[in-house]
Structures are given as C-alpha cells and as structure tokens.
Image (tube, rainbow, N blue to C red):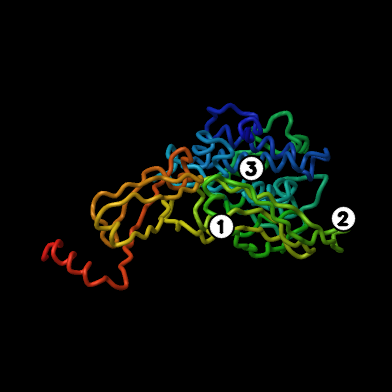
Amino acid sequence: MGKDYYQTLGIPKASNEEEIKKAYRRMALRFHPDKNTEANAEDKFKEVAEAYEVLSDPKKRAVYDQLGEEGLKTGGSGSSGAPGGSTYHYTFHGDPHATFASFFGGSNPFDMFFGSRTHGHPGRPNGFPFQGGGGGGDHHPVHNEGEQDMGDLDEDDPFGHFRQFGFPTAGGLNNGFPPGEGRRRRGGGGHSDRLGTRGRQQDPPVLHELKVSLEEVFHGCTKRMKITRRRLNPDGRSSRTEDKILNIVIKKGWKEGTKITFPKEGDETPDNIPADIAFVLKDKGHAHFKRDGSNIVHSCKVSLKEALCGCTVSIPTLDKRVIALPCHDIIRPGTVKRLRGEGLPFPKNPSQRGDLIVEFSVHFPDRIPPQSREIIRQHLPQS
C-alpha cells in the first residue's frame, strides 16, 4: 500500500482545490519544525508538503487517484488528467521548506507575520504596533497574484496566539496583512531557502549509467548499488564518510534512458545542498536479440536451400522457450516475420507485450558443383 495523501492532509478524496489549500495551510503550520518540537515534526512536515505537491496539481492528482503512489512515482499514464496520456515519473523534491515558502511567501513563519513592512507606521511590523518585537530592518512587501487566505486557521493553529496582539482580521485584512501583502510569487526569487541555509545551492545531479539485460527488463528486478558519500556531523562543520545501499527497482518493460533519481544522496558540506544521485538505464548487448522499443528483433540466417525449398526455424524467446516457426514461402533477403506478444512488456501496461520480430538473411554458398548448376539452370525460371 502506498501513501494516502488525503489522509495525510486529513481531507476526503472529493475535496476541492480550496479545501486542499486550507488543509495544507493548517497542517504545515501545525508541524513546522521551528514551532513544533515533537520528535516526528520534521517527518510530518515533509509528508504534508509532499501530499500537497501532488494533490494541488490536477495532473499529478489524476494519476495518483487512478494508480496510487506507486503508479505516480514509477511511471503511470495520466490519461484521465494529463493531455495526450503523458507519463509521470514523479519524485518529491525533498525540501518541504521550499513548498512552505512557495505557499506562504517565506521560509520563516515568523517573517510572515512580522517581517514585511507595509504602508503603516515606520518601525511597526506590517504597519501595526507590536509590543513583543521590533520592526527593524529594511523589509519590503511582496505581492502574490495567487493569493493565500490566512484568515481561517483553526484552533490547532500554532500561530493563533499572535492574535492577542490585536491584529485586525476584518475590513479586508487577514491577520494584519492587506490582501496580497507579505506573500511572495510562487516559484520566484529563490526565497525557498531553509532557515540557516540561505545562500546554499544544490550541487548538480550525479549521473550513473546502469546497464541492465533484456531478461532483467523482461522480468523486472531490483539492483542494489553501494555508494560512499560524505555527511555532516552534528556540529555542522566536520564531516564523515559513510556507505549506503540504494535499492533501484527496475519495473518490467522500462525503456533505455529511464532515469531513477535519489534526492540529496550526494556529498554534504557546510556550504552545499547534497546533489541528487540519478541512474540512467542502458541496455546490455544480447547474444540473440536487439531492442526496438517494446519489440525485440532476432536475426535468423537460413541457407539458400532452406530459403528456396521451405523450412522450419527455431526462434528463442526471452523466457527461455523455443518457438518453431514454419516458413513455406520463399525467403528473400530482408524477409521479416512477426511473432505477436513475444516481446517486452509495455511499461505502462506490463500485462501486454510487444512483438518478437524475426529478420531473415540468406546464406549463399561460395560455390556450386557444375552438375548442380545445370540442374538449377534447367528448373529455375528465366526471370
């Protein structure tokens, strides 16, 4: 069973876009690790972000509703919600603070309430008096076209106690913000840095070629890859070397070039965000077949006698069977025969398979005895 994103956000499956936003707003504030000191707050905060990333995107949500988490992350067709039946290989980016910043307009929840000076009195956060904190610093309001209403936080809102300072919630103001104030444009400005990581950038992805045999693609398999990486010690400055085993699940029928990504598994230093580790599938050479999408191609050589007089050839398959293929007609060089459903599974529908294509070549003799040549001359047509 995969993750239940609806349960994570505490909403029914029929929830609309606004209900999803409200649920994320409530849960993200409740589990934000800068406010919630419970041991599992960081994990819950990440789960909530991932659930929102999927359910707030109509295409991802359509694939998830149809195929579940596994189908979404291993390549499912979004036929019910993605034009043209596009295929997703969704992987959560791994930074819930980026999602939080994109939604609320800042990675620090305290900045949301006290960090932006509006049109009010200088020195007063958001234009309102606040006895508990200064208005120092040069803050500027940022407008967001995709407005996020913050006026309906429930009793579990960890920032609800801020209302005791008299921030207005009526007359067009939400918790002291005029509509659109104090929020940032989605995806812009690089404001998704986590607290204490401003200025850090993620290293480029590290790509590895992963060779797989056609039999492994046919049956599906799991590859175990050992990586060695550097990780920071608790002091945040020194580092250690550690090994980790990555389990790479190869699904039936996956095509060459498919990329499997493990977020932030690269080296970590005080100055960087670890790179993603990605494996790109590459087909191994095969003794009997070459690949053509979900089809496999087998080259079959026959003698001139067999080509002219007919024969039955034995064709191997990927699942260790041998198919007897009768050939009654004359086989010309380049003749092709197709065995339906004997190829590789379709990645989107592994219960169905491509074809095994048999390409014939004719082996001509180096010489023919004179008596045989005369017989052939007499019996073969002139043209």
Instruction: Please identify, in this view, whether the residue under mark 2 or under mark 1 is nearer the observer.
Output: 1
**From the viewer's perspective, is 111 left or right of 338?**
right
Q: Quadrant of the C terminus?
A: bottom left
Can residue 289 be seen here? The reply is yes
Q: Position of residue 274 (x, y in %)?
A: 72, 60
Q: Earlier in the sequence, mark 1 or mark 3?
A: 3
In the picture of the structure, the residue carrying the numbered disc 3 is 50
**Mark 3 falls on what kind of element?**
helix
Q: Earlier in the sequence, mark 3 or mark 2?
A: 3
The residue positioned farthest toward the right in the image shown: 235
**From the viewer's perspective, is 27 left or right of 134?**
left
Is label 2 in contact with label 1 (beta carbons under 8 Å)? no
Q: Quadrant of the N terminus?
A: top right
Can residue 182 be seen here? The reply is no
In the picture of the structure, the residue carrying the numbered disc 2 is 234
In the picture of the structure, the residue carrying the numbered disc 1 is 281
CA separation in Å, label 2 and label 1: 36 Å
Q: Amino acid at mark 3?
A: Glu
**Mark 2 falls on what kind of element?**
loop
Q: Residue at x 30, y 57 (%)?
A: 306
Q: Residue at x 27, y 70 (%)?
A: 368
Q: Position of residue 338 (x, y in %)?
A: 34, 49
